[in-house]
Structure formats: C-alpha cells, structure tokens
Amino acid sequence: MRFIYQGLILLSFVGLIAGAGEKAESLKRFLQSPDGVQLQVEIRQKQFEQQNIITGTIEILALDKYLFDSENETIVVQGSTVRTWNKQTRQLILDGIIKGEFNLFQLLTGNFKGVEFTKSSRSGDLTKLNYEIKTMGFNGYITFDSESGRPVDLTMYYSPDQSFKITITGVSTLKRESLFNSFAPDALEVIDLRE
C-alpha cells in the first residue's frame, strides 16, 4: 500500500502543472507535447525521521493517459481506470477514479477545484510557482525553466514532518516502444476494486 500512496502523490505533480494557468504556460506546453513526454525522476520522501529515495519514470501521453514506473510498481491511468502493478507480488489492482470525490488523480484529469496557486517568482531562467491544496493540507512549489518549460523539481509538504521532492533528472519525447504502450503485466492475482 505504501507504493500505491507514493505513486498517487508522485502523479499529482503532473496535475498541478496542468492547472497552473498562465503562470506556467511554457511548462504546460512542454508537458502536453502532442508526441508525449517521458520524465526520469528521483523522489525523496521524508516521513518523520525516515527518508526514502525512489527513482522512476513518468510518461504523459494525455491528461487522462499517463504512467508512473519504478523498481517496485507501475501505475497506469487511462480514462477513469487505474491499474497498479506490484512487481514483487505480481499483483494487479484495478480501480477507478470516482467522480465528485477529491483525490490526487483528479489533478491529472483537469479538475483543479481546491488547488490554489499562491505566488510565482523568477530567479534567472527559472520560475518557482507556489501552490496550496487546502482541503488536503498540502502545499509546496514547482520549479521550471521559464522559457522552455522543462520541469526542474516539485516539492510537496503534506504535514510538518512529511514531504516529498521530485527532481527531474532526464526528459525525452515518447517513442512507440513506450512503457505505457507495452504495459502487459503477467499477474498471479488480479483484484478489481471498481464498483
């Protein structure tokens, strides 16, 4: 379950970017490339005194079509269906995005009710965009190249002693052999949580 939660939080950053309005037009253009985009990421998650580091890949094909892949799991969102593949247990969990209920995946599908972009600032070639999600008690900032829109990092605080930082370590255009298009797990167990 820890892996699923980390993936949900990680994927929320794409939605924050997509809802940033005029303050982040270059970033939105970069990530909403018609060819799709692949981001190599390093995630530093702090939970009280513990710190975890995860590396992975995010592929964005459309606002309702994206993937997060790490050593332990793959999360694929297509439309209102969420598939989470635990690579260690070979368990595939099918779930749905519930309309009207706030969750981090909503940010990725364009529903930004409750997300407030509070401040933006520039330092050299970089723009820093602060945000708050008051209903969840989250806040943080996104940093990106002002001209190209290339993301640099995202930091989110979800309690005084809990936070995560995603650093973008590489960026490329999607290829036909993308992880999303080749996702076909060999599941020992399938759990369908959809109603």
Image: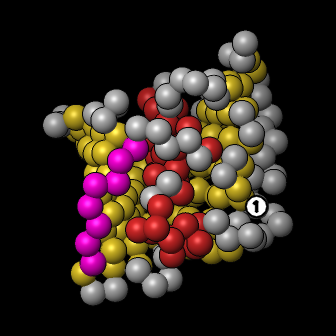
Label 1 sits on a secondary structure element that is loop
Q: Is residue 181 above or below residue 144?
A: above
Q: Is residue 162 magenta?
A: no
Residue at image mark 1: 178
- What is the magenta range? 115-122
Q: Is residue 116 magenta?
A: yes
Quadrant location of the C terminus in the rendered image: top right
Q: Nearer the viewer, residue 88 or 9?
A: 9
Q: Position of residue 21 (x, y in %)?
A: 47, 61
Q: Position of residue 189 (x, y in %)?
A: 74, 20
Q: Quadrant of residue 143?
A: bottom left
Q: Is residue 45 visible?
A: no
Q: Quadrant of residue 175?
A: bottom right
Q: Residue at x 58, y 56 (%)?
A: 58
Q: Residues within 10 Å of mark 1 (few under 14, many from 20)?
A: some
Main SS class of the magenta portion in the image: strand
Q: Is residue 39 visible?
A: yes
Q: Three-letter amino acid code at disc 1?
A: Ser
